[in-house]
Amino acid sequence: MLETQRLIIGAALVSACLAMPARANAQQQDTTRGVRIGLTYQPGTKPGVVVFPVSGPDGDSIQAMVQRDFDYGDRIEVIGGDAVQQTARTQASKNAIDFTIWKSLSAAAVVQISVMGSTAHVNVYDVAAKKLAAAHDVTVSGAPNSEEWRMSVHAMSDQIEQWITGVHGIAATRILYVRGNRIYVIDSDGFGEHAVSGPGTVLAPAWAPDGHTIAFSELARAGWNVVLRDLTTGREHTVSSTPGGLNITPAFSPDGQWLCYAHGEENGTDLYMVSASGSGAARRVTVGRGTDNVSPTFSPDGARLAFTSGRAGHPEVYTSDADGSNVDLLTPFNFGDQNYRSNPDWSPDGRLIAFQSQLDGRFQIMTITLRDRTVKQLTSEGINEDPTWAPDGRHLAFTSSRTGVKEIFVLDAESGRARQLTHDAGARLAAWSRGTGAP
């Protein structure tokens, strides 16, 4: 079986302040979801954003979360510091915004949030145009600091990020991983970690598109089973189409209707497709003739698969149509290399496949373009395995030994910036949700 498995303010306050638009006028501005508000900033750079102190209950926590979400999204430069916040606090108390000061600090936008009950009113100001650019009321539900509350705040951050940059944020997503004999879930910012499976030997968790169903492999008396679990109800059942033997590395189709996984007895493994309900007959997808075929991942349109196969005598990444036809070797054979490429994950935008490749005896995270098959190495420190894409197609979570023990890290594939997500030894086999995960 194959192994499965980142100015303190120099300008003085100007006495003449520009009056802040009234809330009634704010409602007449652009409040359309999913539309970029057209801020002006240099292409290829991150727009500077000032987040004002948040008024209302738990304002400090909300402000800290929004700033952290922007920072971790790697598309916004948060302009902060004590002097910045004092100036913002003074302007808020005067119900006025001095755009001149924020322009001198290279800010493209100012974000102001006020909370009343379960409603947060969000204003986004265009500094260059000196006007309110977007306004919206969002619901912040759940008890403060609960999972529901945190996801509500993260979702607000994601919407603001889309207004400013044109790309929806990934704060309101979650990541599954294995530690010890259990599966855990953690928010994309590293908070809210808790177990979502009981004790047992488990591998390869995967998210369904609905955000509350997961699949994973679990060792039972008769072998490895694929188990489906609803995180909201706690109910689970075993996929019974191929009982016994080895049933591992499940993956959901993008529409959530199908589950693809590897099944084998004693002589290799092949990919099988079954209804995501777990019932009905499974259809064989690959014909490996005694080789291991594992770790399937669907293209965004669900029409094709990428997977690991040992049919060439060593593991490589292959693609095929979802029915198993038109098989093609994706990763190139290199003479003198150790030729071990495995554990692919198809990017949400369909342009790239991430995978792990053995280099000098250690696994590293790589990407390959589907258009011209250009390979790019993303990691080099320690051993790095099992990449999984975020919904934005820019960030990856993966297992790394760079701290001396296995932990989950998050990498910005564009800048190379990495941050550590988990802090308990032994975390591995991450899977990033396609949207908000259920509590």
Image (cartoon, rainbow, N blue to C red):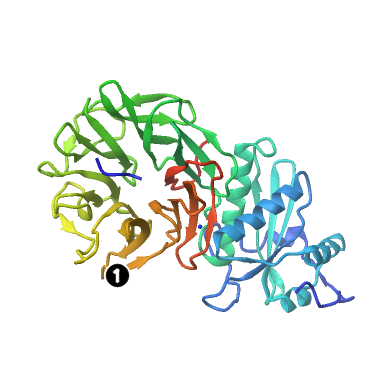
The residue sitting at the right extreme is 15
In depth, the one of 128 and 229 nearer the eye is: 229
The N terminus: image quadrant:
top left
Q: Is residue 111 left or right of residue 97?
A: left
Q: Which residue lies at the image location 70% right of the left edge and 73% below the top edge?
A: 127
Residue at the (66%, 57%) spot, across then down: 67
Quarter that holds the C terminus: top right
Between residue 385 and residue 305, name the one nearer to us: 385
Residue for point 37% across, 58% down: 364
Q: Is residue 130 above or below residue 361?
A: below
Above or below for 416 versus 196: below
Does residue 91 appear left or right of residue 323 in this picture?
Answer: right
Q: Is residue 351 visible?
A: no
Mark count:
1
In this view, the residue farthest toward the left is: 289
Q: Position of residue 321 (x, y in %)?
A: 19, 52
Q: Return the residue at label 1.
A: 374
Please tell me whether mark 1 sits on a helix, a strand or a loop: loop
Within the image, what quadrant is residue 291 found in? Answer: top left
Residue 185 placement (x, y as % from top left): 50, 39
| Quarter where residue 142 is shown | top right
The x and y percentages for residue 250 are 31, 39
- Quarter of the view holding residue 263: top left
For residue 92, side relative to residue 35 (left or right): right
Residue 269 sits above or below residue 309 on the image: above
Q: Is residue 102 visible?
A: yes
